[in-house]
Image: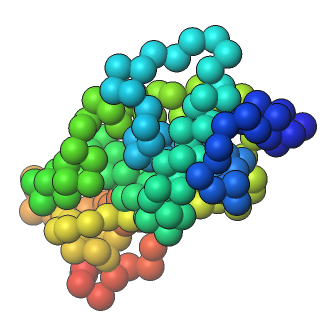
Amino acid sequence: MPATLIAEHVASVALPDPAVQVEDLSNGERAVALYASDMPARYRVSRGDLALLTFWIVQGAARLGLDELYRSAAYASGYRRLRAAGWATPEQDAAHACRFSSASRLERAERLAAVVTYRVAMTPEARERGRRTLVERACDCAGTGWAAFDMGDGTDALQACPGHNPNGHAVLGAGVTA
Ligand SMILES: [Zn+2]
């Protein structure tokens, strides 16, 4: 059972908060925790480093506190989707850069979190939370989850906001007319 293996691996290291286990964190939360940890800037993963990575994840989670960890991971996820879809506003770019001042460290943390997630299971609660997105600052959808785009022929088409409404399930907000 992975939980037992990890407990054995890190038992020799002083844990900042034994209540937090990697299994309880989503992949995005693992990445943000690594970002906030003592992981050296130029760290490169080697075989057998799983215990070290899980230690840093637990350390980063304890350092941020779970509420902030959950929130930051949801913001990172919302922003990643907005940017990938070309929706990110300058205000959102600035908010993300303020939250994660080193883009290269975040990228490294995300890559290493994926290495951990490949090996360490995740609780259903963590998996569910990993689908959450949050958005900070001005959004093209004005927080309604939908934005109208001029199709160039005099008609508008509503599109789901990748950050506020990644699954397209949000009820049409009052600020948007169809
Ligand atoms: Zn939005």
Q: Quadrant of residue 121?
A: top right
Residue furthest right in the image: 1
Q: How many marks?
A: 0
Identity of the residue furthest to the bottom in this view = 174
Residue at horizontal 28 percent and vertical 29 percent from the top:
104
Q: Is residue 18 visible?
A: yes
> Can you say which quadrant of the picture contains the C terminus?
bottom left
Picture coordinates of residue 108 (x, y %)? 39, 28
- Residue 8 falls in which quadrant of the image? top right
Residue 143 is situated, as x and y percent measured from the top left of the image, at 28, 75
**Viewer-closest of 1 and 157:** 1
Residue in the image at 34% along x and 70% along y: 145
Image spot of residue 102 (x, y percent) = 24, 38
Q: Nearer the viewer, residue 129 or 10?
A: 10
* Residue 167 in view in this figure: no
Residue 62 point in image, percent of width and height: 54, 56
